[in-house]
Amino acid sequence: MDISNVRHNYALRLLRQPCQVLWLTVLREQKFRSRSNGQALDTYGPRDDSFHVVLNKSSPEEQLGIKLVRKVDEPGVFIFNVLDGGVADRHGQLEENDRVLAINGHDLRYGSPESAAHLIQASERRIHLVVSRQARQRSPDISQEAGWSSNGSGSPEPGDRSTNPKRLPPVVTCHEKVVSVRKDPSESLGMTVSGGASHSEWDLPIYVISVEPGGVISRDGRIKTGDILLNVNGIELTEVSRNKAVALLKSTSSSMVLKALEVKQCESQEECSSPAALDSNHNTAPPSDWSPSWVMWLELPRYLCNCKDVILRRNTAGSLGFCIVGGYEEYSGNKPFFIKSIVEGTPAYNDGRIRCGDILLAVNGRSTSGMIHACLARMLKELKGKITLTIVSWPGTFL
């Protein structure tokens, strides 16, 4: 049963149907790999000896300021992010990708982030963590400075911060182009497009999924698979349905002017700018219809984002009902805020328009760009009455 374009609740009902054997067909995006040796950049060597970290909260309610996740290829609980200004950040000893082996004597070597969060919340003021850390394997593409103490001990000195570069997603570059083509009035352009407003419940740009060999577009050679079409003969294609876009492209005119956005996804900025670089969208696309990666959507220019305002109302001290990740960080710069999770029975859940993975652009007209996580979280907790959230929904997320 195909669940690639169904509502979340419908997929849940299918998964809850009783059966003895459940077969799942999944899509896993390929990890970004170093072009020099083909090795994934998040490949690590053996873990170093464990060390102890003791964090003290000023009050039982204070947050540690760390985000915990699990990995698909290694058991246990890992630190995904250390939030600026939090207890862990001020202490300075924990880093991203550290593995949490134990909390207050409870073994977490095969534990879950949920159980780790429960142990932290149950602690009064003092949290004792046992942590292990992996050193990145050296690669010609990666320069690194170890944030270790001078005596070579596996335990970093308090206040030291590793300057290891973070694993970066592929680089996405975009540039506009204007293409004029001539054809017989009865001749089709010879390409297939997808996307459009309300496409499978998403508001997407119109993009080219295939080019017919020998057709008008193929002979011209400038419009390629993966290009986003911005307008046809001066008529904008942004925020229009696929049917309307197809009708415009089927024009009987003998000449057509297409404005398009060419999108390239490369392993590095240097590769994207190299004249000899292979275009992963165009030169290695399979014969079947092309499909964009999630990273591509998230890196498109802001004017292609179809923003929508969602109005929630809160007149009590209750939560709006969603958690956020992202924001400005000293070591990684400015990142968008994503909706990480939505709690059932809350204003966000009952409204039904906010999805996990949505980008939160503004709150009551105030842009979230450049805000730190703690600042936005505090603002969302304090707002009452009518609250307007400006969000963008793309079919995919970095979460």
Image (spheres, helix red, strand yellow):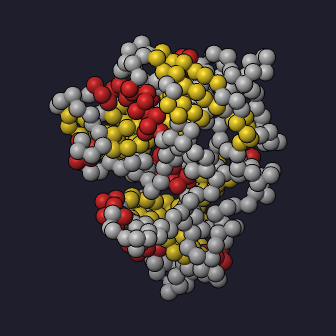
- The residue at 67%/16% (across/down) is 157
Q: Is residue 30 above or below residue 54?
A: below
Q: Nearer the viewer, residue 186 or 110?
A: 110
Extreme residue in the bottom direction: 186
Q: Is residue 283 above or below residue 363?
A: below
Q: Nearer the viewer, residue 302 or 65?
A: 65
Q: Residue 167, percent across and down?
A: 65, 41
Is residue 229 visible in the rendered image? The answer is yes
Is residue 259 visible in the rendered image? The answer is no
Q: Nearer the viewer, residue 260 or 387?
A: 387
Q: Which quadrant of the view contains residue 11?
A: bottom left
Q: Residue 19, percent across and down?
A: 37, 70
- The residue at 38%/26% (across/down) is 122
Q: Nearer the viewer, residue 101 or 77?
A: 101
- The answer to whether 181 appears left or right of 202 in the picture is right
Q: Residue 295, percent across and down?
A: 55, 52
